[in-house]
């Protein structure tokens, strides 16, 4: 059996290859930090991150703070807002904007192929965030994009972490996006800090549990 | 037709066709965007493999034309054009990108995966989709003979709930086929355009009080052209698989209470019972008017006596 993906320092049990998680919560209350921490794997793993509303350089700082070990051989950013900044510890593929789902998909395929060609077989894929995509495209188009992306992740035995801010969308839209994913991680601000709850995945902690967002 | 291959380079097109045919796919092929329409006259492809550059357009134009007729078609941009030279800024076409190579092995593997997993639909698929589709196929075999019976149920439902229309729909791989309707004639609708696509994901009644206010359906023209503003649907479960929905429609927004939901579930259960009964009768051997099972149940063992 292929090795599961583990989440060091987080109250989330390892998940089987091919799993995609929707991480739902306020991005300013630890949700984005949690999503990036879920994407931080071991030295034999690669990460492809689609950033929809912040430049690659800024996101990479947060990735590093979240515990991600960055390198051009194992880190790729698909940047929907940047200008092709060079000299970053990652391969950066720029697309014309968050509405360019075609470009994001092609850039993702290209990055994943580069990893495969370089011998990186285990890949964590992130989208931060689906909320921005929904601001630029209709639900049906974003649904097809998410379905396609999740299908690729499953086919190559990777894992997916897709972030969404549920407050900014109709519940039915969030529920539809969640239906494409294997599980959902809800995030909230508890009395003593961030709390998460995993649903839809077997053998996970029950109910809300506290977590410490890594900030460097 | 299972797969459509579109490539202006005849030699490359034939290599792709040969590789996909050898893998067991039925393949149509053409060399221009304009010719795609001719290929779609007699069928709708499950998968499209297209080059990007054409004298009369792009691969995105090919995908656009195909998805007008086959919205669920999985599409692959199989191209010699490098990714950074594909102009995507004005596009919202979701597809797979694969660099063209002499060896078609990777392409065949991708098409095989797309054919099985169907990961480019714009709607979620039930977890038991393959088994569910098999159950839909079996239900369709008896649905025709039950049409008059279902028509009566839909007429009763419109009267009972005070709605404009009601229908019995079976959700197949790409369509919902309404095998009975009262108050509206829906016929066959693409799966991505019907509310029942979401109803079959649930165990209980799905209610959309106002389709114009629901992000899943607000932009779906077919729903609004049919005058469907309110929708309530109960899953029809045959032999443990959800094959479709018993649904109610109205042209005005309305609510739907707990008692109504329970009654609507009874209508769906009635349809399921009639399907299962018709299937059992259809399985009975010729010359066996009551069936072996019933003989055993009544103790009538015939020649054993």
Image (tube, rainbow, N blue to C red):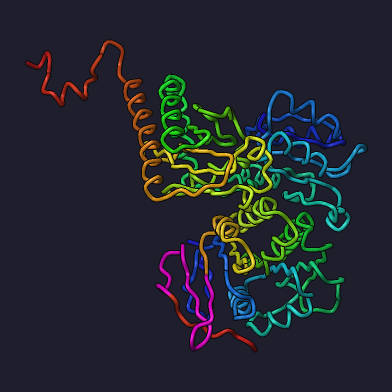
* Residue at horizontal 53 percent and vertical 77 percent from the top: A188
Q: Residue B234, percent across and down?
A: 44, 42
* Magenta span contains residue B190: no
- As drawn, is A44 to the left or to the right of B88? left
Relative height, residue B268 to residue A62 (above, below): above
- Residue B5 image offset from top left, x and y in percent: 76, 35
Quadrant the C terminus of chain B occupies:
top left
In the rendered image, which quarter is residue B52 located in? top right
Q: Nearest the camera: A185 or A9?
A: A185
Task: Using the rendered image of the protein, determine whether residue A41 is visible from the camera's viewpoint.
Answer: no
Whether residue B279 is visible here, answered yes or no, is yes
The residue segment tinted magenta is A186-207
Q: Residue at x 75, y 40 (%)?
A: B49
Q: Along the line of sight, which residue is nearer the eye, B34 or B255?
A: B255
Judge left or right: residue B105 versus residue B138.
right
In terms of depth relative to the viewer, which is nearer, B114 or B289?
B289
Q: Residue at x 13, y 23 (%)?
A: B298
Query: What quarter of the picture does the N terminus of chain B occupy?
Result: top right
Q: Is residue B47 above or below residue B214?
A: above
Residue A6 x, y percent position in the rendering: 52, 73
Count the marks: 0
- The location of residue A73, given as percent across then percent down, is 74, 72
Q: Residue furthest top?
A: B287
In this view, the residue farthest toward the right is: B55
């Amino acid at each position: 059996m292929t090795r599961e993906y583990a989440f060091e320092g987080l109250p989330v049990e390892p998940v089987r290859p091919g799993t995609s998680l929707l991480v739902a919560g306020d991005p300013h209350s630890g949700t984005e930090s949690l999503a990036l921490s879920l994407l931080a794997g071991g030295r034999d793993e690669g990460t492809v991150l689609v950033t929809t509303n912040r430049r690659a350089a800024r996101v990479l700082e947060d990735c590093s703070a979240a515990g991600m070990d960055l390198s051009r051989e194992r880190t790729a950013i698909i940047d929907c807002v940047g200008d092709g900044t060079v000299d970053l510890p990652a391969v950066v593929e720029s697309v014309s904007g968050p509405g360019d789902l075609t470009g994001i998909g092609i850039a993702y395929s290209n990055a994943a192929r580069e990893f495969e060609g370089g011998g990186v077989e285990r890949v964590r894929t992130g989208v931060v965030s689906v909320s921005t995509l929904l601001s630029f495209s209709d639900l049906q188009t974003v649904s097809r994009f998410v379905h396609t992306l999740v299908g690729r992740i499953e086919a190559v035995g990777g894992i997916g972490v897709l972030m969404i801010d549920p407050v900014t969308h109709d519940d039915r839209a969030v529920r539809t996006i969640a239906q494409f994913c294997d599980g959902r991680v809800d995030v909230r601000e508890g009395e003593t800090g961030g709390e998460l709850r995993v649903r839809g995945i077997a053998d996970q902690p029950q109910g809300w549990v506290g977590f410490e967002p890594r900030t460097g | 037709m299972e797969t459509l291959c579109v490539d202006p380079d005849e030699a490359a097109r034939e290599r792709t066709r040969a590789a996909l045919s050898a893998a067991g796919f039925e393949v149509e092929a053409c060399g221009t965007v304009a010719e795609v329409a001719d290929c779609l006259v007699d069928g709708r492809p499950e998968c499209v493999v297209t080059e990007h550059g054409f004298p009369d357009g792009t691969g995105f134009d090919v995908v656009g034309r195909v998805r007008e007729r086959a919205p669920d078609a999985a599409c692959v941009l199989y191209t010699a054009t490098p990714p950074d030279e594909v102009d995507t800024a004005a596009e919202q076409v979701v597809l797979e990108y694969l660099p063209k190579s002499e060896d078609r092995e990777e392409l065949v593997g991708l098409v095989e995966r797309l054919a099985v997993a169907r990961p480019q639909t714009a709607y979620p698929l039930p977890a038991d989709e393959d088994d569910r589709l098999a159950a839909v196929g079996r239900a369709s075999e008896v649905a025709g003979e039950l049409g008059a019976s279902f028509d009566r149920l839909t007429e009763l439902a419109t009267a009972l709930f005070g709605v404009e229309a009601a229908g019995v729909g079976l959700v197949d791989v790409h369509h919902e086929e309404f095998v009975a309707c009262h108050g509206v004639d829906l016929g066959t609708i693409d799966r991505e355009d019907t509310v029942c696509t979401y109803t079959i994901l649930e165990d209980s009644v799905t209610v959309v009080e106002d389709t114009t206010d629901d992000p899943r359906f607000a932009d779906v023209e077919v729903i609004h052209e049919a005058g469907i503003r309110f929708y309530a649907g109960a899953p029809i479960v045959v032999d443990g698989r959800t094959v479709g929905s018993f649904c109610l429609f109205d042209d005005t927004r309305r609510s739907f209470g707990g008692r109504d939901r329970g009654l609507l579930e009874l209508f769906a259960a009635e349809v399921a019972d009639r399907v299962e009964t018709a299937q059992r009768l259809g399985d009975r051997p010729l010359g066996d008017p009551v069936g072996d099972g019933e003989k055993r149940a009544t103790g009538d063992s015939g020649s054993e006596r």
